Amino acid sequence: MNVKITKEDNKYSVVVEGRVDTTNAEQFQQHLAPLMQAQNAEINIDCSALDYTSSQGLRSFLVLQKSTMSHGSNLTLFNMQPQVKEVFDITGFSNIIRIV
């Protein structure tokens, strides 16, 4: 897994590559920690290179979503691969997190 975060003004662009699963979900969440404290920010996560997410990865996305909402920020996931989008759909996370 690789995570790249760039910031311009109050907009964060994140690119996630590889797999987010039980072996690296904690590391993934550590990468996201600064985003969880951002106030009134736009957080956009490019998932085009995200190959797989387990339930632990889903949990990390959910924690980020709850944190961004409580800080007045907006989270959007985009360019999701079909197999990853299916996991979000089946679990109902597509109804919780904005995916475009």
Image (cartoon, grey):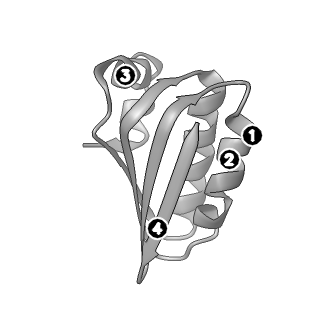
Q: Which amino acid lies under the numbered mark 2 shown in the image of this protein?
A: Gln
Task: Say few, some or many: other residues with alpha carbon within 10 Å of mark 2 (under 14 / 14 to 19 / 20 or more).
Answer: many
Give the residue at mark 1: 26
Instruction: From this view, report whether residue 57 is shown above or below residue 72.
Output: above
Image marks 2 and 4: residues in contact by CB distance under 8 Å = no
How far across and down, in percent of the image, does residue 63 sit?
Answer: 63, 46
**Residues at badges 4 and 3 in contact (C-beta under 8 Å)?**
no
Q: From mark 3 to mark 2, how far is it between C-alphas?
A: 21 Å
Q: Residue at x 41, y 42 (%)?
A: 97
Q: Which residue is mark 4?
A: 6
Indicate the secondary structure of the residue bearing disc 3.
helix
How much space separates mark 4 and mark 3, taking CA atoms?
28 Å
Residue drawn where x is 39% and y is 35% of the image: 49
Residue visible at 42% across and 25% down in the picture: 88
Q: How far apart in space, not on screen, are marks 2 and 4 (Cα)? A: 16 Å
Looking at the image, is mark 2 or mark 4 earlier in the sequence? 4
Dot 1 amino acid type: Glu
Pick whichever, 93 or 4, lies toward us. Answer: 4
Question: Disc 1 to disc 2, how far (Cα)?
Answer: 5 Å
Per the image, the residue denoted by label 2 is 29
Q: Which mark is residue 89?
A: 3
Residue 11 rendering spot, x and y as whole percentages: 40, 72
Q: Which label's residue is closer to the chain start, 4 or 3? A: 4
The residue carrying pointer 1 sits among few (fewer than 14), some (14 to 19) or many (20 or more) residues within 10 Å by Cα, namely some
